[in-house]
Amino acid sequence: MYPTDMQYSMPAEWAKHERTFLSWPVRQSMVYPDHYERVAEGYAQIAEAIAEFEPVTVIANPDDAERIRGRFAGTSVDVLTIPHNDAWFRDNGPTFVVREGGGVAGINWRFNAWGGKYAPWDLDDAVAPKVLEHYGVERFDAPLVMEGGSLHVDGEGTLLTTEECLLNPNRNPDMTREQIEDALKRYLNVSKVIWLKRGLSGDETDGHVDNIACFAAPGKVLMQVCSDPEDDNYAITQENLRVLAEATDAKGRKLEVVPIEQPPMATYEDSRLTLSYLNFYFVNGGIILPVFGGAAARTDRLAEQTLQALYPERRIRTVDGMAIIREGGNVHCTTQQMPARG
Protein backbone atom coordinates (compact mmCIF):
# COMPACT_ATOMS: atom_id res chain seq x y z
CA MET A 1 0.00 0.00 0.00
CA TYR A 2 1.42 3.35 -1.08
CA PRO A 3 0.37 6.83 0.09
CA THR A 4 -1.14 7.47 -3.34
CA ASP A 5 -3.46 4.48 -2.83
CA MET A 6 -4.93 6.29 0.18
CA GLN A 7 -5.13 9.71 -1.56
CA TYR A 8 -2.21 11.18 0.36
CA SER A 9 -0.04 13.79 -1.36
CA MET A 10 2.76 16.14 -0.37
CA PRO A 11 1.53 19.72 0.00
CA ALA A 12 3.59 22.73 -0.99
CA GLU A 13 5.68 24.23 1.79
CA TRP A 14 3.54 27.40 1.82
CA ALA A 15 0.45 25.41 2.87
CA LYS A 16 -0.55 25.86 6.52
CA HIS A 17 1.72 24.14 9.06
CA GLU A 18 0.84 22.48 12.34
CA ARG A 19 4.43 22.91 13.53
CA THR A 20 8.08 23.03 12.49
CA PHE A 21 10.74 20.55 13.59
CA LEU A 22 14.47 21.03 13.84
CA SER A 23 17.24 19.03 15.53
CA TRP A 24 19.77 20.49 17.95
CA PRO A 25 23.40 20.41 16.77
CA VAL A 26 25.75 17.70 18.01
CA ARG A 27 29.31 18.80 18.75
CA GLN A 28 30.84 15.42 17.92
CA SER A 29 29.42 15.45 14.39
CA MET A 30 30.36 19.02 13.53
CA VAL A 31 32.93 19.86 10.88
CA TYR A 32 34.20 22.64 13.16
CA PRO A 33 33.40 21.56 16.73
CA ASP A 34 35.19 24.61 18.17
CA HIS A 35 32.32 26.67 16.70
CA TYR A 36 29.68 24.74 18.62
CA GLU A 37 28.48 27.61 20.80
CA ARG A 38 27.97 29.98 17.85
CA VAL A 39 26.24 27.27 15.81
CA ALA A 40 23.97 26.35 18.71
CA GLU A 41 23.05 30.01 19.15
CA GLY A 42 22.33 30.18 15.40
CA TYR A 43 19.94 27.25 15.72
CA ALA A 44 18.29 28.87 18.73
CA GLN A 45 17.75 32.10 16.81
CA ILE A 46 16.21 30.19 13.89
CA ALA A 47 13.88 28.34 16.27
CA GLU A 48 12.84 31.55 17.99
CA ALA A 49 12.26 33.31 14.66
CA ILE A 50 9.98 30.49 13.48
CA ALA A 51 8.19 30.48 16.84
CA GLU A 52 7.00 34.03 16.09
CA PHE A 53 4.75 32.39 13.47
CA GLU A 54 4.01 28.80 14.53
CA PRO A 55 4.84 26.10 17.12
CA VAL A 56 8.39 24.69 17.05
CA THR A 57 9.68 21.35 18.29
CA VAL A 58 13.42 20.91 18.81
CA ILE A 59 14.73 17.34 18.71
CA ALA A 60 17.34 16.99 21.47
CA ASN A 61 19.76 14.29 22.52
CA PRO A 62 19.08 12.95 26.03
CA ASP A 63 22.19 14.58 27.53
CA ASP A 64 21.22 17.97 26.06
CA ALA A 65 17.47 18.01 26.62
CA GLU A 66 17.30 19.66 30.06
CA ARG A 67 19.75 22.42 29.10
CA ILE A 68 17.90 23.14 25.84
CA ARG A 69 14.55 23.30 27.66
CA GLY A 70 16.11 25.91 29.89
CA ARG A 71 17.32 27.85 26.85
CA PHE A 72 13.75 28.06 25.51
CA ALA A 73 11.93 28.52 28.81
CA GLY A 74 9.07 30.98 28.45
CA THR A 75 8.87 30.59 24.66
CA SER A 76 6.58 28.53 22.41
CA VAL A 77 9.49 26.23 21.51
CA ASP A 78 9.18 22.75 22.99
CA VAL A 79 11.78 19.99 23.19
CA LEU A 80 11.38 16.33 22.24
CA THR A 81 14.10 13.92 23.36
CA ILE A 82 15.25 11.61 20.55
CA PRO A 83 18.87 10.44 20.11
CA HIS A 84 20.44 11.67 16.86
CA ASN A 85 23.87 11.93 15.25
CA ASP A 86 23.56 15.22 13.37
CA ALA A 87 21.31 18.24 13.09
CA TRP A 88 19.89 18.48 9.57
CA PHE A 89 16.29 17.46 10.19
CA ARG A 90 15.17 18.37 6.66
CA ASP A 91 17.16 15.41 5.40
CA ASN A 92 16.71 12.67 8.00
CA GLY A 93 13.27 13.60 9.33
CA PRO A 94 10.02 12.40 7.79
CA THR A 95 8.43 13.99 4.75
CA PHE A 96 4.78 14.65 5.55
CA VAL A 97 1.82 14.04 3.25
CA VAL A 98 -1.84 14.93 3.74
CA ARG A 99 -5.16 13.89 2.27
CA GLU A 100 -8.25 15.86 1.46
CA GLY A 101 -10.79 15.83 4.25
CA GLY A 102 -8.12 15.57 6.92
CA GLY A 103 -5.29 13.30 7.92
CA VAL A 104 -1.51 13.44 7.82
CA ALA A 105 1.06 10.68 7.32
CA GLY A 106 4.84 10.58 7.18
CA ILE A 107 7.26 9.08 4.68
CA ASN A 108 10.18 7.36 6.39
CA TRP A 109 12.95 7.47 3.78
CA ARG A 110 16.24 5.68 4.28
CA PHE A 111 19.08 7.99 5.30
CA ASN A 112 22.80 7.38 4.69
CA ALA A 113 24.38 10.75 5.61
CA TRP A 114 24.51 12.19 2.10
CA GLY A 115 26.08 9.20 0.46
CA GLY A 116 28.03 7.91 3.46
CA LYS A 117 29.94 11.15 4.09
CA TYR A 118 29.53 11.32 7.87
CA ALA A 119 29.56 8.16 10.00
CA PRO A 120 27.82 7.11 12.12
CA TRP A 121 24.29 7.83 10.93
CA ASP A 122 22.32 4.98 12.50
CA LEU A 123 20.61 7.23 15.05
CA ASP A 124 19.65 9.74 12.36
CA ASP A 125 18.11 6.98 10.27
CA ALA A 126 15.90 6.05 13.24
CA VAL A 127 14.66 9.59 14.01
CA ALA A 128 11.74 9.76 11.57
CA PRO A 129 9.89 6.68 12.92
CA LYS A 130 10.22 7.96 16.48
CA VAL A 131 8.85 11.38 15.58
CA LEU A 132 5.89 9.82 13.77
CA GLU A 133 5.19 7.46 16.66
CA HIS A 134 5.30 10.31 19.18
CA TYR A 135 2.70 12.31 17.25
CA GLY A 136 0.53 9.33 16.34
CA VAL A 137 1.12 9.80 12.61
CA GLU A 138 0.70 6.96 10.13
CA ARG A 139 4.04 5.84 8.66
CA PHE A 140 5.02 4.68 5.19
CA ASP A 141 8.48 3.12 4.89
CA ALA A 142 10.06 3.95 1.54
CA PRO A 143 12.75 1.54 0.29
CA LEU A 144 15.13 4.19 -1.04
CA VAL A 145 17.60 6.75 0.22
CA MET A 146 16.12 10.22 -0.04
CA GLU A 147 16.69 13.56 1.68
CA GLY A 148 14.06 16.24 2.11
CA GLY A 149 16.42 18.93 0.85
CA SER A 150 16.70 17.17 -2.49
CA LEU A 151 13.10 17.88 -3.53
CA HIS A 152 10.49 20.62 -3.73
CA VAL A 153 6.83 20.27 -4.76
CA ASP A 154 4.24 22.76 -5.98
CA GLY A 155 1.29 21.03 -4.30
CA GLU A 156 -0.33 20.42 -7.69
CA GLY A 157 1.54 17.35 -8.85
CA THR A 158 4.98 18.70 -9.85
CA LEU A 159 8.29 17.89 -8.17
CA LEU A 160 11.61 19.69 -8.68
CA THR A 161 14.95 17.97 -8.07
CA THR A 162 18.49 17.58 -9.48
CA GLU A 163 20.15 14.77 -11.35
CA GLU A 164 23.39 15.45 -9.48
CA CYS A 165 21.83 14.33 -6.21
CA LEU A 166 19.16 11.75 -6.97
CA LEU A 167 21.15 9.93 -9.64
CA ASN A 168 24.36 9.94 -7.61
CA PRO A 169 25.58 6.34 -7.18
CA ASN A 170 26.20 6.99 -3.48
CA ARG A 171 22.44 7.07 -2.83
CA ASN A 172 20.50 4.38 -4.73
CA PRO A 173 23.04 2.70 -7.04
CA ASP A 174 20.70 -0.17 -7.99
CA MET A 175 17.84 2.09 -9.08
CA THR A 176 17.42 3.70 -12.47
CA ARG A 177 16.20 7.24 -13.02
CA GLU A 178 12.82 5.82 -14.02
CA GLN A 179 12.59 3.71 -10.86
CA ILE A 180 13.47 6.66 -8.63
CA GLU A 181 10.92 8.83 -10.40
CA ASP A 182 8.28 6.13 -10.05
CA ALA A 183 8.97 5.88 -6.29
CA LEU A 184 8.59 9.63 -5.88
CA LYS A 185 5.27 9.50 -7.69
CA ARG A 186 4.00 6.61 -5.55
CA TYR A 187 5.03 8.10 -2.20
CA LEU A 188 4.42 11.82 -2.78
CA ASN A 189 1.55 11.59 -5.30
CA VAL A 190 3.22 13.72 -7.95
CA SER A 191 2.77 13.12 -11.67
CA LYS A 192 5.61 15.22 -13.13
CA VAL A 193 9.27 15.35 -12.09
CA ILE A 194 11.41 18.21 -13.42
CA TRP A 195 15.08 17.26 -13.33
CA LEU A 196 17.51 20.16 -13.03
CA LYS A 197 21.11 19.19 -13.76
CA ARG A 198 23.30 20.35 -10.88
CA GLY A 199 23.14 22.21 -7.61
CA LEU A 200 25.42 25.00 -6.41
CA SER A 201 29.18 24.76 -6.62
CA GLY A 202 30.70 23.43 -3.41
CA ASP A 203 27.46 21.96 -2.07
CA GLU A 204 28.52 18.84 -0.18
CA THR A 205 25.01 17.40 -0.38
CA ASP A 206 25.72 16.61 -4.05
CA GLY A 207 23.43 19.31 -5.36
CA HIS A 208 20.35 19.61 -3.15
CA VAL A 209 17.69 21.55 -5.00
CA ASP A 210 16.78 23.59 -1.91
CA ASN A 211 19.94 25.65 -2.37
CA ILE A 212 19.36 26.59 -5.98
CA ALA A 213 15.64 26.56 -6.86
CA CYS A 214 12.18 26.19 -5.39
CA PHE A 215 8.56 26.69 -6.33
CA ALA A 216 7.27 30.14 -5.51
CA ALA A 217 3.74 29.13 -6.54
CA PRO A 218 2.27 26.64 -9.00
CA GLY A 219 3.79 27.48 -12.37
CA LYS A 220 6.43 29.78 -10.85
CA VAL A 221 10.01 28.88 -9.85
CA LEU A 222 12.52 30.94 -7.88
CA MET A 223 16.13 30.36 -8.91
CA GLN A 224 19.36 31.73 -7.50
CA VAL A 225 21.42 32.97 -10.45
CA CYS A 226 24.98 34.06 -11.13
CA SER A 227 26.06 36.76 -13.60
CA ASP A 228 29.83 36.16 -13.44
CA PRO A 229 31.01 33.82 -16.24
CA GLU A 230 34.18 33.11 -14.23
CA ASP A 231 32.15 31.66 -11.35
CA ASP A 232 31.32 27.92 -11.50
CA ASN A 233 27.73 28.77 -10.64
CA TYR A 234 27.32 30.67 -13.90
CA ALA A 235 27.41 27.55 -16.07
CA ILE A 236 25.39 25.61 -13.49
CA THR A 237 22.57 28.15 -13.36
CA GLN A 238 22.54 28.76 -17.12
CA GLU A 239 22.10 25.04 -17.70
CA ASN A 240 19.29 24.86 -15.15
CA LEU A 241 17.58 27.91 -16.66
CA ARG A 242 17.57 26.14 -20.04
CA VAL A 243 15.91 23.10 -18.43
CA LEU A 244 13.21 25.27 -16.88
CA ALA A 245 12.65 27.19 -20.12
CA GLU A 246 11.81 23.92 -21.87
CA ALA A 247 9.80 22.38 -19.02
CA THR A 248 6.10 22.24 -18.31
CA ASP A 249 4.51 21.30 -15.00
CA ALA A 250 1.96 18.62 -14.15
CA LYS A 251 -0.84 20.90 -15.37
CA GLY A 252 0.92 21.55 -18.69
CA ARG A 253 1.91 25.11 -17.79
CA LYS A 254 5.12 26.74 -18.95
CA LEU A 255 7.13 27.90 -15.98
CA GLU A 256 7.76 31.50 -15.01
CA VAL A 257 11.25 31.86 -13.50
CA VAL A 258 11.96 34.56 -10.92
CA PRO A 259 15.72 35.13 -10.50
CA ILE A 260 17.42 35.96 -7.21
CA GLU A 261 21.02 37.16 -7.50
CA GLN A 262 23.47 35.03 -5.55
CA PRO A 263 25.48 36.61 -2.70
CA PRO A 264 29.18 37.27 -3.33
CA MET A 265 31.33 34.16 -3.09
CA ALA A 266 32.69 33.44 0.38
CA THR A 267 35.16 30.80 1.54
CA TYR A 268 36.33 29.34 4.82
CA GLU A 269 39.61 27.44 5.09
CA ASP A 270 39.84 27.33 1.28
CA SER A 271 36.38 25.75 0.91
CA ARG A 272 33.52 27.59 -0.77
CA LEU A 273 30.55 28.23 1.49
CA THR A 274 27.17 27.37 -0.03
CA LEU A 275 25.53 30.74 0.48
CA SER A 276 21.96 30.63 -0.73
CA TYR A 277 18.91 32.83 -0.33
CA LEU A 278 16.89 29.90 -1.71
CA ASN A 279 17.50 28.15 1.61
CA PHE A 280 14.68 30.26 3.05
CA TYR A 281 11.72 28.63 4.77
CA PHE A 282 7.97 29.28 4.53
CA VAL A 283 6.14 29.63 7.85
CA ASN A 284 2.53 30.51 8.61
CA GLY A 285 2.19 34.12 7.52
CA GLY A 286 5.90 34.63 6.91
CA ILE A 287 9.24 33.63 5.43
CA ILE A 288 12.47 32.98 7.36
CA LEU A 289 15.28 34.32 5.13
CA PRO A 290 19.01 33.84 5.79
CA VAL A 291 21.06 36.95 5.05
CA PHE A 292 24.84 37.21 5.10
CA GLY A 293 25.85 40.82 5.75
CA GLY A 294 29.13 42.49 4.90
CA ALA A 295 29.92 42.16 1.20
CA ALA A 296 26.47 40.61 0.70
CA ALA A 297 24.54 43.63 2.00
CA ARG A 298 23.31 44.60 -1.48
CA THR A 299 22.19 41.11 -2.51
CA ASP A 300 20.67 40.58 0.95
CA ARG A 301 18.49 43.62 0.31
CA LEU A 302 17.58 42.50 -3.21
CA ALA A 303 16.60 39.00 -2.01
CA GLU A 304 14.39 40.45 0.71
CA GLN A 305 12.78 42.86 -1.77
CA THR A 306 12.15 40.07 -4.30
CA LEU A 307 10.44 37.87 -1.73
CA GLN A 308 8.41 40.71 -0.28
CA ALA A 309 7.16 41.65 -3.76
CA LEU A 310 6.17 38.02 -4.41
CA TYR A 311 4.50 37.64 -1.00
CA PRO A 312 3.16 41.02 0.13
CA GLU A 313 0.92 39.30 2.66
CA ARG A 314 3.86 37.56 4.39
CA ARG A 315 6.34 39.05 6.85
CA ILE A 316 9.96 38.51 5.79
CA ARG A 317 11.90 37.62 8.95
CA THR A 318 15.66 37.68 8.38
CA VAL A 319 18.18 35.65 10.38
CA ASP A 320 21.97 35.54 10.40
CA GLY A 321 22.85 33.17 7.56
CA MET A 322 26.52 33.08 8.57
CA ALA A 323 25.85 31.52 11.99
CA ILE A 324 25.63 27.91 10.80
CA ILE A 325 26.72 27.94 7.15
CA ARG A 326 30.25 26.65 7.84
CA GLU A 327 28.59 23.40 8.85
CA GLY A 328 27.16 23.08 5.34
CA GLY A 329 23.57 24.26 5.38
CA ASN A 330 21.12 26.92 6.46
CA VAL A 331 17.53 27.58 7.52
CA HIS A 332 15.75 25.24 5.12
CA CYS A 333 18.24 22.44 5.77
CA THR A 334 17.62 22.59 9.51
CA THR A 335 13.82 22.53 9.36
CA GLN A 336 10.93 20.30 8.34
CA GLN A 337 7.29 21.33 8.24
CA MET A 338 4.45 19.23 9.58
CA PRO A 339 1.39 20.36 7.58
CA ALA A 340 -1.91 21.07 9.29
CA ARG A 341 -4.01 17.93 9.59
CA GLY A 342 -7.01 19.52 7.92
Image (spheres, helix red, strand yellow):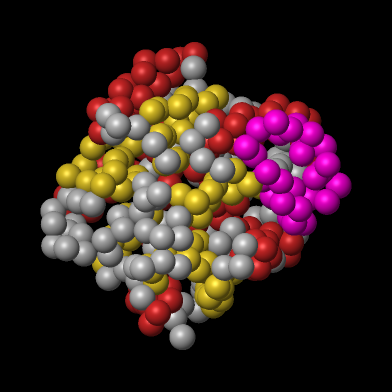
Left or right: where 90 falls relative to 211: right
In the rendered view, tell whether residue 272 sits above or below residue 83.
above
In the rendered view, tell whether residue 314 sits above or below residue 107.
above
Q: How many marks?
A: 0
Left or right: where 53 falls relative to 8: right
Bounds of the magenta span? 58-84
Name the residue nearer the viewer: 270 or 172: 172
Is residue 36 at all visible to an observer of this figure?
Answer: no
Q: Residue at horizontal 47%, vertical 66%?
A: 104
- Image location (x, y in percent) of residue 130: 68, 65
Q: Quadrant of residue 270?
A: top right
Q: Residue furthest right?
A: 63
Magenta includes 62?
Answer: yes
- Image location (x, y in percent) of residue 214: 34, 46
Magenta includes 78?
Answer: yes
Q: Residue at horizontal 37%, vertical 50%?
A: 15
- Image location (x, y in percent) of residue 139: 56, 73
Q: Quadrant of the C terminus?
A: bottom left
- Image location (x, y in percent) of residue 140: 53, 75
Q: Residue at horizontal 34%, vertical 68%?
A: 100
Q: Quadrant of residue 211?
A: top left
In the rendered view, tell whether residue 259 sits above or below residue 117.
above
Name the residue nearer the viewer: 76 or 163: 76
Is residue 216 at all visible to an observer of this figure?
Answer: yes
Q: Residue at horizontal 30%, vertical 32%?
A: 313
